[in-house]
Amino acid sequence: MSTRSLRLVAPFRCQFNLDSAKMVEEGENFNVFLQSLNTDFRTARERCFPNVPQGIMVEALLRPDDKSAESRYISLEQAGSHFNSPKQFSVGFDEKLRPDIAKYMQDAAHEADKVCGKVLSNVLSPMLETLDIAIYEKTIAILTLDLAIDDRFNDSDWAMLDEWTTRLVFFFLNPIYRKYIFPTFRGINEYAQSRGEKRIRSPREYYLLFDLSDEKGNADRTRLLWVNRTLVCPKGEALNDWATRHMDATRTIDVNGAHAHMSWGNNIIETTNAERPAAFSGVWDGLYLAQYYYAVLDVVSKNLKRFICATYDKKQNRELRALSRAMDYVINSVTVIEVDYKDFPMELQGVPKAVFRRLEKEWDFSTLLLNVRGKRDLCKSHGELLTAYINQRNSIRVEMVLTGVAGVGLVGLMMNLSSYGRALKREGYTNDVVGLLDIGQHLSPSVMIWIGLFLAVAISIFVSMNRTR
């Protein structure tokens, strides 16, 4: 039996998103909804989740009791964190689906062999019992899978490892996402809407994460972000170039005698007693959190471009007001994400904290965070410009209405002067000096109306030409 294994951690996108602002304001009793969801999924699945494929197992992870001091240190693998863990659901497959899942994995391995031009499926064996799919907030999900590395795995195989494992995950994830994961969380979103649960955002209202909204129309497309690899092997066996390029003795994290090397590329865990990957839960806690927050910041950064590049000229006022509300929501959501990212790791302890802090530096979180902040500030500037543009457009309309009212008034005034002048003329009143009130005696009613219309048009032209642009 091989003593080496490789853990693949692959973030991807999934149509599930919590409302950040509402979770801050009303997150205390979110467990009530999650308990109801778990109960209905077990006892009333056909009625409450009619579109969820058979054989899928979903469990909402309840948040630990606030009154329990110990809960703040519970492993993320069990029930999330005391402080608003981003991990929300665990997805599995029952016995009936396991043959299908095994077939998808076998097909994915053969396809990876074909595309890479090198057969690695005979020396890298997926351990399906380790397959785990966790759904987090902000449309982020993480797939975990361990591969057993055969002793025949040689140096030339290491050269193709990164590409082959990425292909494997994509070719495996593609069918199961479309067939199982996407319809499952479509059903959960529908369940939340039927219960009036506003803390779970409807896919029609993904203003910030717009690329996965129903409005885009391609939410069922597989969106694999990347694949991170961690080699778990006995000390002294990580001697090839693939492993040594990620190892630095000065930055080693001690994990009960084992040595964890966390780097910008892949990771190495050197074991002392041939432990399996599951023995290093503290390492995975920190790694999953780092993967999640990096993925969220990366996805948010890309989606913010939509608001920075927005134009206003050809939009109706209704569309502009909707865009303004969306911008306000986006700015608030990005701020909450930044606050969560800064607050949550402060509650980590021991190995998870050491791993998270190491990966922050290796993956250069600070540059990514600055990028997000810069785009958020640009969105703020665009929001202010949009508000000014809407106000200007509204003021123009007010001017047009007032000008129209003034024009109607002028026409009415001329008609009244004409009627007054004719009345004076019938009574035989004459005046040698012609004043404004006497003009109706000398001009016909039609001429008076035309004068009024001319003055109204002239005023409209003057206001239009001298309006502040």
Image (cartoon, grey):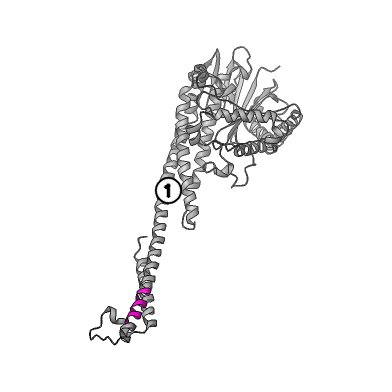
Q: Is residue 143 above or below residue 416?
A: above
Residue visible at 37% across and 70% down? 409
Question: Can see residue 413?
Answer: yes
Where residue 371 appears, x then y in whole percent?
Answer: 45, 38
Point 37% across, 72% down: residue: 456
Residue 295 in percent (x, y) is at 54, 34
Q: Residue furthest front?
A: 427
Q: Find residue 243 and report its horizontal and vertical position in percent.
A: 58, 23
Q: How many residues crowd around disc 1 within 10 Å: few (fewer than 14), some, or many (20 or more)?
A: some
Classify mark 1: helix, strand or loop: helix
Which portion, as a residue range, is magenta? 411-421
The dominant secondary structure in magenta is helix
Q: Which residue corresponds to the image point at 63% horizontal and 45% vertical from the top-left?
A: 218
Q: Amino acid at mark 1?
A: His
Residue placed most toward the observer, 52 or 355: 52
Please give left or right for residue 146 compared with residue 455 in the image: right
Res. 156 visible in picture: no
Quarter where residue 204 is shown:
top right
Q: Which quarter of the picture shows residue 467?
A: bottom left
What residue sits right under mark 1 in the picture? 382
Q: Is residue 86 left or right of residue 413?
A: right
Residue 216 belongs to the span the image colors magenta? no
- Vertical comparison of 194 with 467: above or below: above
The x and y percentages for residue 369 are 45, 35
Position of the N terminus, as image quadrant, is top right
